[in-house]
Amino acid sequence: MRPARALRIHCPVDAATLQALLDGDMNVMRADPLLAGMLRIIEDDNPLGDFTLYQGVVEITPGWECFTPLPEARPAKGTADAPAISPTVILTTYIAAGAPEPQLADALDRIMALHPWEVPVIELVEMHLLVRTPA
């Protein structure tokens, strides 16, 4: 096993973008400004997406998020005290243990700056990846 961290970024997208992904149109990811921007950050020269022999690795999952903004919130989507559902794409990428913290911090700062939500849902989790034993 290889120690690592998983980074999960919940990206709001238009319903049409999510539907196109569900229909198999992968090109729509590069047409959506937020999703394309997040993918560019992951693909840049930084510790994100490190799989030793592969770089820029990201798992892409369609989803929906449900939430109710409180009266003091300034939501990018929805209105106070009303339940909302947001079409979402969840990007999961990986960071090797021992990755250079300054480079990682820079990439995470860029993700936070790009994310449009008042309170972004971005998870950073310690984990282990299984690895093959050389034959």
Image (cartoon, helix red, strand yellow):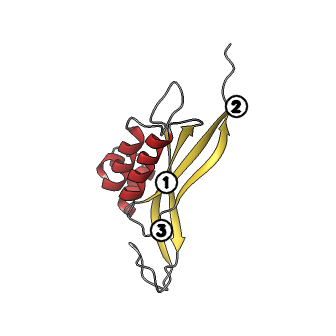
Q: In which quarter of the image is residue 133?
A: top right
The residue positioned 57% from the left and 51% from the top of the image is 124
Classify mark 1: residues with Cα within 10 Å, few (<14), some (14-19) or many (20+): many
Q: Tell me which numbered mark, 2 or 1, is placed earlier along the sequence.
A: 2
**Is residue 13 shown above or below 97?**
below
Numbered marks: total: 3
Residue 18 versus residue 53: which sits nearer the camera?
53
Left or right: 55 with respect to 98? left
Residue 49: x and y, percent?
49, 37
For label 3, the residue is: 119
Residue 129 versus residue 84: which sits nearer the camera?
129
Q: Residue furthest top?
A: 135
Q: Which amino acid does label 3 sit on?
A: Val
Would you say residue 26 is visible in this rendering? no
Q: Distance between the residues labelled 2 and 1?
A: 24 Å
Left or right: 116 with respect to 105? left
Residue 74: x and y, percent?
40, 78
Q: How far apart are marks 2 and 3 (CA)?
A: 33 Å
For label 1, the residue is: 9
Residue 52: x and y, percent?
54, 27
Judged from the image, the secondary structure of the residue bearing numbered disc 2 is loop
Q: Which residue lies furthest to the front in this view?
A: 102
The dot on residue 1 is 2
Q: Tell me which numbered mark, 3 or 1, is placed earlier along the sequence.
A: 1
The residue positioned 44% from the left and 36% from the top of the image is 56
> Which-is-in-front pick, marks 3 and 1?
3
Q: Tell me which numbered mark, 2 or 3, is placed earlier along the sequence.
A: 2
Q: Which amino acid does label 1 sit on?
A: Ile
Left or right: 30 with respect to 22? left
